[in-house]
Protein backbone atom coordinates (compact mmCIF):
# COMPACT_ATOMS: atom_id res chain seq x y z
CA UNK A 1 0.00 0.00 0.00
CA UNK A 2 2.83 2.40 0.93
CA UNK A 3 4.62 1.62 -2.34
CA UNK A 4 1.47 2.23 -4.34
CA UNK A 5 0.83 5.54 -2.56
CA UNK A 6 4.43 6.66 -3.16
CA UNK A 7 4.09 5.75 -6.85
CA UNK A 8 0.82 7.71 -7.10
CA UNK A 9 2.36 10.80 -5.51
CA UNK A 10 5.40 10.63 -7.75
CA UNK A 11 3.24 10.31 -10.85
CA UNK A 12 1.06 13.19 -9.69
CA UNK A 13 4.12 15.39 -9.12
CA UNK A 14 5.60 14.77 -12.55
CA UNK A 15 2.25 15.06 -14.32
CA UNK A 16 1.67 18.45 -12.69
CA UNK A 17 5.00 19.77 -13.92
CA UNK A 18 5.22 21.63 -17.22
CA UNK A 19 6.63 19.44 -19.98
CA UNK A 20 9.82 21.08 -21.22
CA UNK A 21 11.07 20.16 -24.65
CA UNK A 22 12.73 21.57 -27.74
CA UNK A 23 10.83 20.01 -30.61
CA UNK A 24 12.71 20.57 -33.85
CA UNK A 25 14.13 18.85 -36.84
CA UNK A 26 17.83 18.82 -37.56
CA UNK A 27 17.24 21.24 -40.43
CA UNK A 28 16.05 23.85 -37.87
CA UNK A 29 19.43 24.07 -36.16
CA UNK A 30 21.32 27.35 -36.64
CA UNK A 31 24.48 27.19 -34.52
CA UNK A 32 26.38 30.47 -34.38
CA UNK A 33 29.46 30.63 -36.60
CA UNK A 34 32.77 31.71 -35.14
CA UNK A 35 33.41 35.42 -34.91
CA UNK A 36 29.97 36.63 -33.80
CA UNK A 37 29.31 39.28 -31.15
CA UNK A 38 32.65 40.64 -30.04
CA UNK A 39 32.90 42.53 -26.72
CA UNK A 40 34.86 45.78 -26.90
CA UNK A 41 35.65 47.78 -23.76
CA UNK A 42 34.65 51.43 -24.19
CA UNK A 43 35.61 52.51 -20.64
CA UNK A 44 36.93 50.58 -17.63
CA UNK A 45 34.57 47.69 -16.89
CA UNK A 46 31.98 48.73 -19.52
CA UNK A 47 31.55 47.24 -23.00
CA UNK A 48 29.78 47.41 -26.35
CA UNK A 49 29.03 44.42 -28.58
CA UNK A 50 30.29 44.74 -32.14
CA UNK A 51 30.11 42.53 -35.22
CA UNK A 52 27.43 40.20 -36.62
CA UNK A 53 24.94 38.62 -34.24
CA UNK A 54 23.83 35.00 -34.04
CA UNK A 55 20.51 33.76 -35.40
CA UNK A 56 17.96 32.14 -33.10
CA UNK A 57 18.92 28.48 -32.79
CA UNK A 58 16.04 26.23 -31.64
CA UNK A 59 18.58 23.46 -30.98
CA UNK A 60 20.55 25.58 -28.52
CA UNK A 61 20.76 24.15 -25.00
CA UNK A 62 19.18 27.28 -23.48
CA UNK A 63 15.91 26.96 -25.41
CA UNK A 64 12.99 25.88 -23.23
CA UNK A 65 9.67 25.21 -24.95
CA UNK A 66 7.48 24.49 -21.92
CA UNK A 67 4.03 22.99 -22.35
CA UNK A 68 1.29 23.14 -19.68
CA UNK A 69 1.31 20.18 -17.29
CA UNK A 70 -1.39 17.53 -17.04
CA UNK A 71 -3.19 19.30 -14.18
CA UNK A 72 -2.82 22.81 -15.65
CA UNK A 73 -5.80 24.82 -16.79
CA UNK A 74 -6.87 23.96 -20.32
CA UNK A 75 -7.84 26.92 -22.46
CA UNK A 76 -8.30 25.05 -25.77
CA UNK A 77 -7.22 21.92 -27.62
CA UNK A 78 -3.90 23.59 -28.36
CA UNK A 79 -2.43 25.99 -25.81
CA UNK A 80 -1.62 29.61 -26.58
CA UNK A 81 2.06 30.45 -26.24
CA UNK A 82 4.04 33.28 -24.69
CA UNK A 83 7.50 34.14 -25.99
CA UNK A 84 9.58 35.45 -23.09
CA UNK A 85 12.33 37.97 -23.97
CA UNK A 86 14.76 38.01 -21.06
CA UNK A 87 16.17 41.04 -19.31
CA UNK A 88 19.65 42.50 -19.21
CA UNK A 89 21.14 39.83 -16.95
CA UNK A 90 19.85 36.90 -19.04
CA UNK A 91 17.03 34.52 -18.11
CA UNK A 92 16.67 34.66 -14.35
CA UNK A 93 14.17 34.12 -11.56
CA UNK A 94 11.58 36.57 -12.96
CA UNK A 95 11.58 34.89 -16.37
CA UNK A 96 11.40 31.41 -14.87
CA UNK A 97 8.56 32.50 -12.59
CA UNK A 98 6.70 33.90 -15.59
CA UNK A 99 7.04 30.55 -17.37
CA UNK A 100 5.91 28.65 -14.26
CA UNK A 101 2.81 30.79 -13.75
CA UNK A 102 1.83 30.73 -17.41
CA UNK A 103 2.31 26.95 -17.70
CA UNK A 104 0.11 26.37 -14.65
CA UNK A 105 -2.64 28.44 -16.28
CA UNK A 106 -2.61 26.61 -19.59
CA UNK A 107 -0.17 28.79 -21.54
CA UNK A 108 2.92 27.31 -23.20
CA UNK A 109 6.12 29.37 -23.02
CA UNK A 110 9.28 29.77 -25.08
CA UNK A 111 12.34 31.02 -23.19
CA UNK A 112 15.96 31.18 -24.36
CA UNK A 113 19.30 32.89 -23.68
CA UNK A 114 20.28 35.33 -26.41
CA UNK A 115 23.72 35.92 -24.89
CA UNK A 116 24.69 32.26 -24.81
CA UNK A 117 23.50 31.91 -28.42
CA UNK A 118 26.05 34.59 -29.25
CA UNK A 119 28.81 32.59 -27.59
CA UNK A 120 29.05 34.42 -24.26
CA UNK A 121 29.74 32.33 -21.16
CA UNK A 122 28.74 34.89 -18.56
CA UNK A 123 26.93 32.94 -15.84
CA UNK A 124 28.16 33.74 -12.36
CA UNK A 125 29.41 37.19 -13.40
CA UNK A 126 27.81 40.64 -13.49
CA UNK A 127 29.09 41.26 -17.02
CA UNK A 128 25.75 41.85 -18.72
CA UNK A 129 23.96 43.21 -15.65
CA UNK A 130 26.23 46.21 -15.17
CA UNK A 131 29.00 46.05 -17.77
CA UNK A 132 27.41 46.23 -21.25
CA UNK A 133 25.45 48.96 -23.03
CA UNK A 134 21.67 48.68 -23.28
CA UNK A 135 21.73 48.81 -27.07
CA UNK A 136 24.19 45.89 -27.22
CA UNK A 137 22.02 43.74 -24.97
CA UNK A 138 18.82 44.68 -26.76
CA UNK A 139 20.21 44.05 -30.25
CA UNK A 140 21.12 40.48 -29.27
CA UNK A 141 17.81 39.84 -27.51
CA UNK A 142 15.79 41.37 -30.36
CA UNK A 143 17.40 39.25 -33.07
CA UNK A 144 16.88 36.07 -31.04
CA UNK A 145 13.28 36.99 -30.18
CA UNK A 146 12.43 37.78 -33.79
CA UNK A 147 13.90 34.43 -34.84
CA UNK A 148 12.01 32.64 -32.06
CA UNK A 149 8.77 34.21 -33.29
CA UNK A 150 9.32 33.02 -36.86
CA UNK A 151 10.27 29.54 -35.64
CA UNK A 152 7.37 28.98 -33.25
CA UNK A 153 4.81 29.98 -35.90
CA UNK A 154 5.55 26.63 -37.57
CA UNK A 155 5.00 24.55 -34.42
CA UNK A 156 1.90 22.36 -34.65
CA UNK A 157 1.67 21.72 -30.89
CA UNK A 158 0.61 25.26 -29.97
CA UNK A 159 -2.08 27.63 -31.20
CA UNK A 160 -0.06 29.78 -33.58
CA UNK A 161 -2.96 32.21 -33.93
CA UNK A 162 -2.65 33.02 -30.23
CA UNK A 163 0.94 33.98 -29.59
CA UNK A 164 1.87 36.54 -26.94
CA UNK A 165 5.18 38.26 -26.19
CA UNK A 166 6.47 39.40 -22.82
CA UNK A 167 9.75 41.14 -22.15
CA UNK A 168 11.28 42.51 -18.96
CA UNK A 169 13.65 45.49 -18.75
CA UNK A 170 15.92 45.30 -21.83
CA UNK A 171 13.56 42.54 -22.93
CA UNK A 172 10.74 45.06 -22.46
CA UNK A 173 12.37 47.35 -25.02
CA UNK A 174 12.68 44.34 -27.31
CA UNK A 175 9.02 43.47 -26.76
CA UNK A 176 7.70 46.90 -27.71
CA UNK A 177 9.83 46.77 -30.85
CA UNK A 178 8.42 43.32 -31.63
CA UNK A 179 4.95 44.88 -31.56
CA UNK A 180 5.94 46.76 -34.73
CA UNK A 181 7.07 43.75 -36.80
CA UNK A 182 4.82 40.80 -35.89
CA UNK A 183 1.78 39.63 -37.87
CA UNK A 184 -1.55 40.28 -36.06
CA UNK A 185 -2.76 36.96 -37.47
CA UNK A 186 -0.33 35.28 -35.06
CA UNK A 187 0.42 37.67 -32.18
CA UNK A 188 -2.51 38.95 -30.13
CA UNK A 189 -0.89 41.14 -27.44
CA UNK A 190 2.61 42.26 -26.44
CA UNK A 191 3.53 43.01 -22.82
CA UNK A 192 6.55 45.32 -22.36
CA UNK A 193 7.53 45.42 -18.68
CA UNK A 194 9.96 47.96 -17.23
CA UNK A 195 11.28 49.08 -20.63
CA UNK A 196 14.05 51.73 -20.45
CA UNK A 197 14.39 54.65 -22.84
CA UNK A 198 18.00 53.78 -23.76
CA UNK A 199 18.76 51.07 -26.28
CA UNK A 200 17.44 50.23 -29.74
CA UNK A 201 14.81 52.98 -29.72
CA UNK A 202 11.04 52.80 -29.99
CA UNK A 203 9.04 52.23 -33.20
CA UNK A 204 6.89 54.86 -34.90
CA UNK A 205 4.00 52.43 -35.39
CA UNK A 206 2.88 49.17 -33.81
CA UNK A 207 0.80 46.40 -35.39
CA UNK A 208 -0.71 44.70 -32.33
CA UNK A 209 -2.02 45.86 -28.93
CA UNK A 210 0.78 46.78 -26.51
CA UNK A 211 0.63 46.87 -22.72
CA UNK A 212 3.32 49.04 -21.12
CA UNK A 213 3.88 47.58 -17.63
CA UNK A 214 5.62 49.44 -14.79
CA UNK A 215 5.90 49.16 -11.04
CA UNK A 216 5.26 52.55 -9.47
CA UNK A 217 8.55 52.16 -7.57
CA UNK A 218 10.63 51.26 -10.64
CA UNK A 219 13.76 53.41 -10.44
CA UNK A 220 16.10 50.78 -11.89
CA UNK A 221 19.22 52.46 -13.25
CA UNK A 222 18.13 55.83 -11.89
CA UNK A 223 20.48 58.50 -10.55
CA UNK A 224 18.06 59.44 -7.76
CA UNK A 225 15.49 57.52 -5.74
CA UNK A 226 12.57 59.03 -7.68
CA UNK A 227 14.17 58.76 -11.13
CA UNK A 228 11.29 56.63 -12.39
CA UNK A 229 11.91 54.32 -15.33
CA UNK A 230 8.80 55.26 -17.33
CA UNK A 231 9.61 59.01 -17.14
CA UNK A 232 13.37 58.79 -17.70
CA UNK A 233 15.01 60.19 -20.81
CA UNK A 234 18.52 59.48 -22.06
CA UNK A 235 20.87 61.18 -24.55
CA UNK A 236 20.67 59.92 -28.11
CA UNK A 237 24.32 58.83 -28.02
CA UNK A 238 23.36 55.68 -26.07
CA UNK A 239 21.03 54.38 -28.81
CA UNK A 240 21.66 52.20 -31.85
CA UNK A 241 19.07 50.66 -34.22
CA UNK A 242 18.58 46.88 -34.22
CA UNK A 243 18.82 44.69 -37.29
CA UNK A 244 15.32 43.80 -38.50
CA UNK A 245 13.52 46.37 -36.35
CA UNK A 246 10.90 48.78 -37.73
CA UNK A 247 11.63 52.45 -38.32
CA UNK A 248 11.53 54.42 -35.11
CA UNK A 249 13.24 56.86 -32.79
CA UNK A 250 16.70 55.29 -33.22
CA UNK A 251 16.74 56.48 -36.84
CA UNK A 252 16.58 60.07 -35.53
CA UNK A 253 18.29 59.74 -32.16
CA UNK A 254 21.38 57.54 -31.90
CA UNK A 255 25.13 57.30 -31.59
CA UNK A 256 25.41 58.50 -35.20
CA UNK A 257 22.34 60.75 -35.60
CA UNK A 258 21.82 63.74 -33.29
CA UNK A 259 23.99 62.14 -30.57
CA UNK A 260 23.92 65.24 -28.35
CA UNK A 261 20.13 65.47 -28.33
CA UNK A 262 17.84 63.96 -25.69
CA UNK A 263 15.46 61.10 -26.50
CA UNK A 264 11.88 60.48 -25.42
CA UNK A 265 10.87 58.70 -22.25
CA UNK A 266 8.81 55.51 -22.62
CA UNK A 267 5.81 57.42 -21.28
CA UNK A 268 6.20 60.26 -23.81
CA UNK A 269 6.60 57.80 -26.66
CA UNK A 270 3.53 55.74 -25.70
CA UNK A 271 1.41 58.86 -25.18
CA UNK A 272 2.31 60.00 -28.70
CA UNK A 273 1.19 56.66 -30.13
CA UNK A 274 -2.03 56.76 -28.09
CA UNK A 275 -2.77 60.26 -29.41
CA UNK A 276 -2.49 58.83 -32.94
CA UNK A 277 -5.01 56.11 -32.11
CA UNK A 278 -2.49 53.29 -31.84
CA UNK A 279 -3.35 50.47 -29.39
CA UNK A 280 -1.14 51.26 -26.37
CA UNK A 281 -2.21 50.93 -22.74
CA UNK A 282 -0.36 51.49 -19.45
CA UNK A 283 -0.50 49.06 -16.53
CA UNK A 284 0.89 50.58 -13.32
CA UNK A 285 1.22 48.58 -10.09
CA UNK A 286 1.46 49.78 -6.49
CA UNK A 287 4.01 48.10 -4.18
CA UNK A 288 6.12 47.11 -7.17
CA UNK A 289 9.56 48.06 -8.45
CA UNK A 290 11.45 46.59 -11.44
CA UNK A 291 10.41 43.05 -12.32
CA UNK A 292 7.07 42.22 -10.75
CA UNK A 293 7.84 38.49 -10.64
CA UNK A 294 11.41 38.87 -9.36
CA UNK A 295 10.44 38.18 -5.73
CA UNK A 296 10.05 40.45 -2.67
CA UNK A 297 11.08 44.09 -3.02
CA UNK A 298 14.85 44.65 -2.76
CA UNK A 299 15.96 48.29 -2.47
CA UNK A 300 19.50 47.65 -3.67
CA UNK A 301 22.02 49.70 -5.65
CA UNK A 302 24.04 48.82 -8.76
CA UNK A 303 27.55 49.91 -9.77
CA UNK A 304 28.13 50.28 -13.52
CA UNK A 305 31.68 50.00 -14.84
CA UNK A 306 34.78 50.13 -12.67
CA UNK A 307 37.57 52.47 -11.65
CA UNK A 308 37.24 56.27 -11.72
CA UNK A 309 34.44 56.19 -14.32
CA UNK A 310 32.21 53.82 -12.31
CA UNK A 311 28.74 55.10 -11.46
CA UNK A 312 26.35 53.92 -8.78
CA UNK A 313 22.64 53.78 -9.61
CA UNK A 314 19.44 52.77 -7.90
CA UNK A 315 18.31 49.24 -8.62
CA UNK A 316 15.07 48.49 -6.81
CA UNK A 317 13.56 45.19 -7.95
CA UNK A 318 10.62 42.95 -7.06
CA UNK A 319 7.08 43.45 -5.84
CA UNK A 320 4.69 42.51 -3.09
CA UNK A 321 2.93 39.17 -3.55
CA UNK A 322 -0.34 41.06 -4.03
CA UNK A 323 1.11 43.09 -6.92
CA UNK A 324 2.73 40.02 -8.50
CA UNK A 325 -0.53 38.06 -8.32
CA UNK A 326 -2.52 40.93 -9.76
CA UNK A 327 -0.04 41.22 -12.66
CA UNK A 328 -0.34 37.49 -13.41
CA UNK A 329 -4.13 37.76 -13.27
CA UNK A 330 -4.08 40.73 -15.66
CA UNK A 331 -1.91 38.77 -18.09
CA UNK A 332 -4.34 35.88 -18.05
CA UNK A 333 -7.34 38.19 -18.53
CA UNK A 334 -5.73 39.55 -21.71
CA UNK A 335 -4.91 36.07 -22.95
CA UNK A 336 -8.41 34.72 -22.23
CA UNK A 337 -9.95 37.77 -23.92
CA UNK A 338 -8.48 36.53 -27.22
CA UNK A 339 -10.96 33.65 -27.18
CA UNK A 340 -14.50 34.16 -28.52
Image: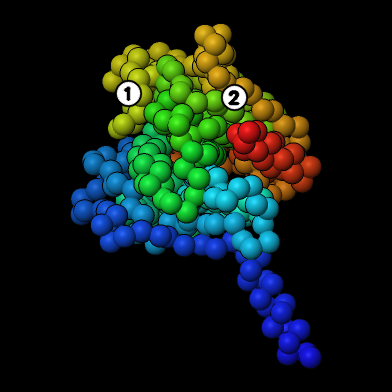
Relative to residue 87, is residue 26 depicted above or below? Answer: below
| Residue ID for mark 1 | 255
| Residue 4 vs residue 224, the one in the foreground | 4
Quarter of the image with the N terminus is bottom right
Question: How far apart, in angstroms, are the residues tagged by discs 2 and 1?
Answer: 22 Å
Asked whether residue 66 appears in the rendered view, the answer is: yes
Residue at x 36% of width, y 24% of height: 246
Asked whether residue 218 appears in the rendered view, the answer is: no
Give neighbour class at mark 2: few <14, some 14-19, many 20+ (Cα, 10 Å).
many
Give neighbour class at mark 1: few <14, some 14-19, many 20+ (Cα, 10 Å).
some
Relative to residue 243, is residue 258 depicted above or below? Answer: above
* Residue 153 marker: none
Residue at x 42% of width, y 60% of height: 22
Residue at x 28% of width, y 43% of height: 53
- The answer to whether residue 222 is left or right of residue 284 is left
| Residue 67 vs residue 264, the one in the foreground | 67
| Residue 244 vs residue 269, the one in the foreground | 244
Tell me the element at label 1.
Answer: loop
| Residue ID for mark 2 | 230
Question: x and y percent of residue 183 in the render?
Answer: 42, 30
Amino acid sequence: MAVALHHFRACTFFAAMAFITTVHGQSDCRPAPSGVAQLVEIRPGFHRVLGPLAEFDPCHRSVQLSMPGFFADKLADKPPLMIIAHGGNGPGSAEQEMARRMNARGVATLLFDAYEMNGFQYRGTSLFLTGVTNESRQRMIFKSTLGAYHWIRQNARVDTTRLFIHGLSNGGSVALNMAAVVDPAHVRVVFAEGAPSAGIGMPDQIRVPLKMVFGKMDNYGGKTENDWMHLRTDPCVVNQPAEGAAVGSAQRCSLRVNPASQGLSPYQWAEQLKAEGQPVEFWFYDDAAHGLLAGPIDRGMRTYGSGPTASQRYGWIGASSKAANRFAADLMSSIKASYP
